[in-house]
Image (spheres, grey):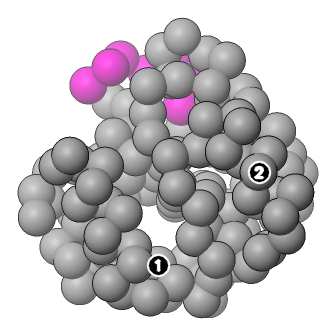
Amino acid sequence: MDSEKKILLVEDNFEDAAVTKRVLKHNKLNNDLVIAASGKEALAALQNKTEADLPQLILLDINLPDISGIDLLTCIKKDDNLRSIPVVILTGSNEDQDIQKSYDLGASSYLVKPISNDALRLVIEKLFYP
């Protein structure tokens, strides 16, 4: 896989972030990984960036300490500079309403934790190499 892809992981749980980072490393996608521990950190990482500095993929948890992942997804998809970035929801919630709302707002995929190496790899391959 192409290790030059920029990925933003928005995850407040250190252990979940470490697991996701290991999966990305296993698939050789960890070279340009930025981790934001909150919605506010994620917004700061996305604002005022040139197109070249923006991530090519956002991995987003729904349950964040400040701004919910759903609200963050809404902000991303309403922003002309960000809306084309694929967003994969990585969350512990398998609630139908969360899944449906995420897709309605423009999420590219929805994965329930714990994520498997193969599931995340397949989603990333599909998004990066359609």
What's the mark number on residue 65?
none
Which residue matches tag 1?
Answer: 20
Nearer to the camera, 115 or 5 = 115
| Earlier sequence position, callout 2 versus callout 1 | 1
Neighbor class of circle 1 (other Cα within 10 Å; few <14, some 14-19, many 20+) is many
Image label count: 2
Q: Residue at x 83, y 64 (%)?
A: 96
* Residue 66 lies in the magenta stretch: no
Question: Mark 1: which secondary structure?
Answer: helix
Position above or below: 119 against 98: below
Front: mark 2 or 1: 2
Which residue is rendered at x = 21% and y = 77% of the image?
A: 27
Q: Amino acid at mark 1?
A: Thr
- From the viewer's perspective, tell me whether residue 9 is left or right of residue 99: left
Q: Position of residue 90 (x, y in %)?
A: 61, 67
What segment is highlighted magenta in the picture? 46-52
Task: Give the residue at mark 2.
Answer: 100
